[in-house]
Amino acid sequence: MGPFPASGKKLDLNYLGIMRFEDGKIAEMWVEWDNLTILTQLGHFPPEKKMGAGGTHSHEVRYENVRVPLTNILGVEGEGLQQTLKILDGGRISVGALSVGIAQAALEEGVRYAKERQSFGKALKEHQAIQWLVADAAAEIHAARLMVYYAAWLKDQGKPYTKAGAVAKLFATEMAERASYSAIQIHGSYGYSREYPVEAMYKAARLMTIGEGTSEIQRMVIARKVFEDGPVRI
Ligand SMILES: Cc1cc2nc3c(=O)[nH]c(=O)nc-3n(C[C@H](O)[C@H](O)[C@H](O)COP(=O)(O)OP(=O)(O)OC[C@H]3O[C@@H](n4cnc5c(N)ncnc54)[C@H](O)[C@@H]3O)c2cc1C
């Protein structure tokens, strides 16, 4: 199992595991850390040295010879994969929202700096090149926000939202990278400095296109749905 965030004291931790039975059926199961009759061996590793997102620790977790009682099954035996995919569908809307937040914060920093900093006798905000960076980011943030709202609305209405969630996730996460890139560009060398927050935003945005399904996986999901449903509407 790959790295995922874990925080708090060791004994507070529980894990959601995806288990495959000998007959091939998959189920989601609750794995409790502190029950040694359940966990015969669980390795807990030091935090990963990550590029960004330092506010959460990410640890590798390894299950070896773990025995989990059948009473720990969440949902229905044999439907674990569908249940997991459903959780990912919802999570993608959240990552889209997170990305809109990162992008907006980066743009606000860029705008603030563009008003302050003078170059060639005028404020940065007076240069058309800087205005275009701001305008593109503002337009893309707005589009991404509407996509996230739309996917969330579909979910609230109990309507299918797999495609809309993947579209929102794909666009919003890649957009957050572009917006935070522009924010660094507006700051010039200060954008590359840890004295200013935009470098951390850029690194946080980079994660968004990976976690909860990479951009490549979102494109696979969207393409599959477009071929099934028709390309006209999301
Ligand atoms: C900081 C951090 C926190 C995380 N938190 C969690 C968490 O809380 N819970 C959790 O379950 N996971 C978590 N993850 C794991 C994350 O979801 C996976 O890393 C991510 O889904 C990609 O899987 P992978 O790393 O195995 O990449 P791989 O599957 O090895 O993919 C490598 C590359 O190949 C591409 N690729 C793979 N298969 C295909 C294909 N069929 N077609 C085209 N391209 C393909 C991928 O898009 C990617 O670019 C976290 C990861 C990070 C970095």
Image (cartoon, rainbow, N blue to C red):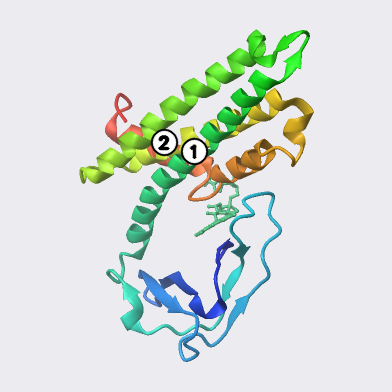
Q: Residue at x 38, y 38 (%)?
A: 224
Residue situated in front as seen by the camera: 87 or 65:
87
How far across and how far down the image is residue 17, in percent? 45, 70
User: Which three-letter amino acid code belongs to the residue tagged 2?
Assistant: Ala
Q: Please name the residue that numbered disc 2 is placed on.
A: 168
Indicate the secondary structure of the residue bearing disc 1: helix
- Above or below 25: residue 64: below
Q: Which residue is drawn at 31% across and 82% down?
A: 71
Q: In this view, does 157 lie to the left or right of 27?
A: left
**Quarter of the image where the N terminus is located:** bottom right
Residue 225: quarter of image: top left
Q: Does the residue labelled 2 lie within 8 Å of ligand 1?
A: no
How far across and how far down the image is residue 51, in percent? 69, 49
The answer to whether one can see residue 225 in this image is no
Mark 2, other Cα within 10 Å: few <14 / some 14–19 / many ≥20:
many
Residue 21: quarter of image: bottom left
Q: How many marks?
A: 2
User: Which three-letter amino acid code belongs to the residue tagged 1?
Assistant: Gly
Q: Residue at x 53, y 88 (%)?
A: 40
How far across and how far down the image is residue 44, in percent? 62, 75
**Quarter of the image where the C terminus is located:** top left
Q: Please name the residue that numbered disc 1 is placed on.
A: 101
Label ID, residue 42: none
The answer to whether one can see residue 48 in this image is yes
